Amino acid sequence: MEVYAELARQDGAALRIDWFGNVGNSLRFGPEQRTLKVSCSRWRLDLGWTLGAGDERQEIEIPIAILPQIRLADVWQNGSFVESAPLTRLLFQDLQVDEQTTEVLPVGLPYSPLGGASSYVLPFNVFNVHRDHTRSWIARVQVDPNTMLVVPSLELFRFYFGATGSVLEGIMAGADAEQRLYHAAYISRSSNAANLVLGMGMPAAAAPTVARIALDDEAKKAFFTLIKGGRIAGLNRTDWQPRMGFPCKRQLSTPLDLCRSIRCRRPVAAYGRERAMSARCRCRRWQCAG
């Protein structure tokens, strides 16, 4: 089991992951290492999942590369995962995700539904863990006239693009993001296989996700939306809030026949040669999975 010192309180108490905040640079984890601020609270394991179990809020900073291992509401202690929140699983059949049904907006921005009274997407009186990051982005999907699905942008980023920490680091690299991920990508007309030249140091496990970013229009659009903010922040040397919606435009519960074989070529530093690799993509990584 992985142990992350950044997810350990000095007093040894457990902590709960409450909200994802700004992305920035920190010399703590190496030069030009992208980091993520995470809002947490001390968690009383003996009280179970009750309203009084969380108190003493704090903010920690983690390398962006470990984001795939962390989910909102997870509980950690001494750097090790303890448990996830008890969740209710809901299935939204044929949920349509497109420009008409989906909005991406700051979580702290008031809005007026259908010309009604102004309110917040996540009201502070019932959910306040995002109060330190009201400019963080969320994707909001209108399920039906009485139901709205709200997903933090960084949770979408983690779920859809978090195949490996290397991919997340590459996407957050700012102006060099595209070169960090891949050097060339195309689909063979004869074999219908996706062909990639992965960026230096990018592992084979990243191939399905990188192929999707390089060759799928909606995933590429989400990718460029993310790196645009990173480029501006890099020039100004400031923290930033990644903005991302669903990297697809379709009904989420409908399967796609987009599973392709992927052939990758990764540059090898020694002698400047290339080593050929192959990988079989999983439908869940290539398609827009619900």
Image: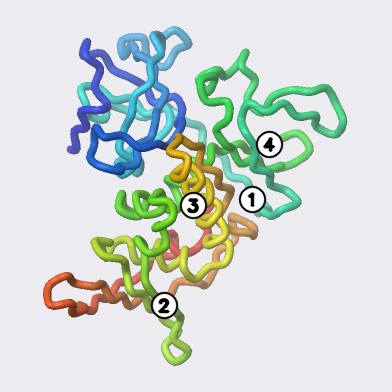
Tag 2: amino acid: Ala
Secondary structure at badge 4 equals strand
Label 1 vs 4, first from the N-terminus = 1
The residue that mark 2 highlights is 194
Cα separation between marks 4 and 2: 36 Å
Residue at the far front: name it: 236
Percent from the top left, x then y, of residue 14?
28, 17
Label 4 vs 3, first from the N-terminus = 4
Label 2 vs 3, first from the N-terminus = 2
The residue that mark 1 highlights is 93
- Mark drawn on residue 148: 4
Tag 1: amino acid: Gln
Q: Nearer the viewer, residue 203 or 180?
A: 180
Q: Nearer the viewer, residue 267 or 142?
A: 267
Residue at the far bottom: name it: 190
Residue at 39% across / 58% down in the picture? 176
Tag 4: amino acid: Met
Q: Nearer the viewer, residue 189 or 62?
A: 62
Looking at the image, do the residues carrying marks 2 and 3 touch, with CB atoms under 8 Å apart?
A: no
Percent from the top left, x then y, of residue 266?
26, 72
The residue that mark 3 highlights is 227
Tag 3: amino acid: Ile
Q: Nearer the viewer, residue 189 or 58?
A: 58
Q: Residues within 10 Å of mark 2 (few under 14, many from 20)?
A: many
Query: In which quarter of the view is residue 112 placed?
Result: top right
Cα separation between marks 2 and 3: 23 Å
Percent from the top left, x then y, of residue 254?
59, 61
Secondary structure at badge 2 equals strand
Q: Residues within 10 Å of mark 1 (few under 14, many from 20)?
A: few
